[in-house]
Amino acid sequence: MTAASRGPLVLILHQAHYDLLAILRNRQARFFTLILPLPFLVIFTGVFGNHTAHTDGTFVKLKAYYVPGIGALGVIAASFVNLVISITAQREGGILKRRRATPVPAWVLVAGRTLTAVTVSLTVLTVLLAFGRFVYGVKLPTSTLPGIALTAVVGSVTFCVLGYALSTAISNEDSAQPMVQAIMLPLYFISGVFVPNITLPPWLKHVAQVFPVEHLSDGLHHAYIPGVHGVGIVWSDIGVLAIWAAIGLGVALLRFSWLPKAEAG
Amino acid sequence: MEPVVSVHGLRKRYGQFEAVAGIDLEVQRGEIFAFLGPNGAGKTTTVEILEGFRTRTEGEVSVLGVDPAKGDAAWRNRVGAVLQESNAEPGLTVRESLQLYSGYYLHPRDIDETIALVGLEEKADTLGPQLSGGQRRRLDVALGLIGDPELIFLDEPTTGFDPSARRTAWHVIDGLRELGKTVFLTTHYMDEAEQLADRIAVIAGGRIVAEGTPGTLGGRNRMAATIRFTLPEGSGADDLPPELRALLAGEDGRVTMTSDSPLRHVGALADWALARGIDLPDLDVRRPTLEDVYLQLTRSES
């Protein structure tokens, strides 16, 4: 029995297994996706961790702020950044085209790759939260775990879809890395990842609220607010992420090509 | 029996440019069919239409009884494609790459058997990107074969190979014949087509300019032979008998004659030389090579 003969779900798991293997064996992906978020957490917490900030109507220690904030960065690195770079390289190298010459359905390839990204995202996030808990003593209220999990999964899927959408605008592998960083770095600064957004002028906050990074980081931050009620889900953040996912899906469906740029069209 | 590939009046236009200008092709089951042509002749466009990667402007195309533009998973289970340019799967070994691809198919070939077929047993646990160019291409062929297709497209399978790697690849492709596969091969190496193909079609400027077996393509079997030799000092081409002088095609230290009946003319040349007591140690009679035929066929078009 092959994966294909056992139905699409098994085939998605089959694809995700080999996609994951490829990420774990890629030195660049290992460093930027799996390792780098941790030094970011250590540096930001080391410099600003004992200051306090006012967020969502209450004061929190900044280290309790950076743990979920850098968590958002970890999710984006594993979903968006890593996916755009690998998909662009696979498209230009003819790998996507070769896969499309087989019977595997296109949506299975996309679902398998997305499942891989969600898995890596949740792993990186778990490591960051555990590091925060045991090294910095930043406790996560257990009641809000569902909020963290849902926000992380929705955020990861959204950034995968946006990754597929953005890859259509990138002509080759070499420009993928600078392109994703040029988009993400300013958003990290205005969306409460590197800098507590309380320090931002109101207009910049409004700008940030248009984009999905703010809503991923806000959703994760929310679960860390002491005394938060319920399971910690911020439906408005989930809603905005879902809208971005829908936009990304529309762009990807219209523009995504399995063939190298030079051949498409 | 229904042909495996059948193409009638195929056209592909890009704006004003007509890349494929109305071609007909038929490939029979079990045949190794070579599709030759210079770069930009419409070769890859045609193959990609047959593989289902490109739409066509006009014409009828059937591959294994299915229009490739509507090829579904069931059809893809029966067709293999080795693309012109495709990198190895990053991060996966030869065996893992084949495991990944074999999962896509309903009735794949055995993985170890396929590795052996392309001669990569020693490299089964090497990462794809670490293979040499020739080995990587053989991995491509293995990935195209893993689904056990009835028909396999091989797009320039040996471009950039050194001679010994090409011999190995030819051996692999020749082995497909024994498996009963139909092979649609594109190449611009004449020796490759001559070595492997049962039948050849030449495309130039978007049109089929010749079709035939390697021995008869473009009237090769009827084309004039070339006779060349050097006359010893003291005698010149003018001394030759009139019958041979009429065949002269050039003299640049070496005499060149073209002949439709080489046996008779070489005989006359031998009689003439022996009568004068001279030898022609570099005498050379040559049939036109497939390459000569090909260059003649494609010269005006490219």
Image: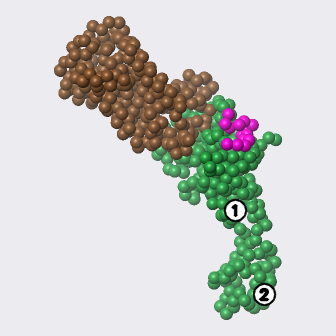
Chain colours: A brown, B green
Q: Which portion, as a residue range, is magenta? A: B57-70
Q: Quadrant of the N terminus of chain B?
A: top right
Left or right side of B170 for A78: left
**Could you tell me residue B263's position as x and y percent?**
80, 75
Q: Residue at x 35, y 32 (%)?
A: A184
Between label 2 and label 1, give the one nearer the viewer. Answer: 1
Q: Residue at x 50, y 39 (%)?
A: A91
Q: Which residue is mark 2?
A: B241
**Could you tell me residue B193's position as x and y percent?**
67, 56
In the image, is residue B162 part of the stretch drawn in magenta?
A: no
The amino acid on which the numbered mark 2 sits, given as a three-letter code, is: Pro
Whether residue B6 is visible, yes or no, is yes
**Could you tell me residue A40's position as x and y percent?**
27, 29
In the image, is residue B61 part of the stretch drawn in magenta?
A: yes
| Separation of marks 2 and 1 at Cα, in angstroms | 34 Å
The amino acid on which the numbered mark 1 sits, given as a three-letter code, is: Leu
Instruction: Identify the mark nearer the N-term, 2 or 1.
Output: 2
Among the 4 quarters of the image, the one containing residue B261: bottom right
Task: Name the one closer to the observer, B83 or A22.
Answer: B83
Among the 4 quarters of the image, the one containing residue A63: top left
Whether residue B145 is visible, yes or no, is no
Q: Chain of mark 1?
A: B
Q: Which residue is mark 1?
A: B297
Disc 2 residue crowd, few under 14, some 14–19, many 20+, Cα 10 Å: few
| Element on which disc 1 rests | helix
Q: Chain of mark 2?
A: B
**Could you tell me residue A81's position as x and y percent?**
39, 33
Left or right side of A204 for A16: right
